[in-house]
Image: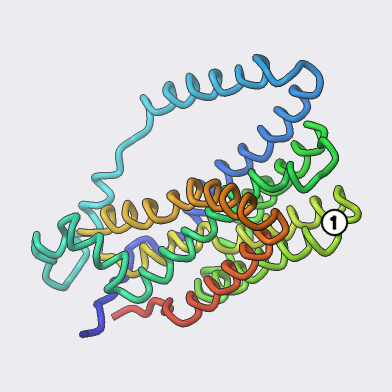
Amino acid sequence: MSRPTTWAPADSGLPEARRTNEAAGYTAVGVTALLTGYLATSYGLRPVPELIGVVFGVAGLALALVVRDTAAHVALELAQHTKPLPTDEETGLKATFTRTSWHHRSLRGASQAGLINNLNDGLTWGSSPALHRPRPRARRVGLIKGLYPTLWGLGQIPTGHLAGRIGRKPLVIYGMLVQAAGFVLALALLERPLLAGVLSAVFLGLGTAMVYPILIASISDHAHTAWRANTLGTYRFWRDIGYAAGALVVGILADALSLNATVIAAAVLTAASGLLAARWIAEHTKD
């Protein structure tokens, strides 16, 4: 199999743009988790915490009406390429899906890491409350689940900057290993559940901050502008299906084995994903 061609994005500030977008989104997730935990403790699970979702939905729709399209930026970047543009067969959804999912080593490595990263997130939403026995308080669960995405969000500011200096690959590899350590801590300190939950959330949050925006930047590094949108769509398909997979995994393994075994499996799977990233992902070099 011939070595896939890589392409240099025109926007050298890509990691910085990605980190700002992702940081805003996941910091909001963390703040919302803290807020809903407090509201659920004070007013009950329904309907007050759910009303926040209604407000966010309306606000998001209003903002979507004024967001500017990026088609002009894509056209400008295409015009700056000196090499022949890919054919329609190379840029189509089917070709891009198979290229991203398997044929291109770096795109494959980033896609599997994204899937496992979000599988972890789905798994923690199912396992964290159950690990805090007996009968966890909503405020405590809100603290732990709020701390995780808040660190995930704010941490992307420095990690996005760092990726432009040391490259994408080290952050992805070590970020996955830090996440694996977070699962180990959740079990090692289980006699002190609040401490275990907080430390686990810190490691998972920092590890995810090292990985999350960097994977998208890595995908963009290796995708020509003409098929980058399809490539990002394919990557995000694999990444975001991890949320559902994590919820299913925690339910199935917890019933079949135990919750502790599920957390151990998550740690092993995450570490293995980091090692696969080390083997498959290559740093982008300009042609």
What is the crowding at mark 1: few (fewer than 14 residues within 10 Å), some, or many (at least 20)? some
Which quarter of the figure has residue 71? Answer: top left
Compared with 106, 155 (above or below) is: above
Q: Is residue 165 visible?
A: no
**The residue positioned farthest toward the front in the image shown:** 256
Compared with 89, 64 (above or below) is: above
Which residue is found at the position 20% from the left and 59% from the top?
A: 226
Amino acid at the residue labelled 1:
Leu
Secondary structure state at the residue bearing disc 1: loop
Which residue is label 1 attached to? 190
Viewport quadrant of the N terminus: bottom left
| Pick the front one: 83 or 59 | 59
- Residue 54 image offset from top left, x and y in percent: 54, 18
Which quarter of the figure has residue 274? Answer: bottom right
**The residue positioned farthest toward the right in the image shown:** 192
Which residue is found at the position 57% from the left and 68% from the top?
A: 269
**The residue positioned farthest toward the bottom in the image shown:** 2
Q: Is residue 114 left or right of residue 48?
A: left
Which quarter of the figure has residue 200? Answer: bottom right
| Pick the front one: 200 or 163 | 200
Which residue is found at the position 18% from the left and 63% from the top?
A: 95
Task: Give the total number of marks visible in the rendering.
Answer: 1
Viewport quadrant of the C terminus: bottom left
Q: Is residue 276 visible?
A: yes
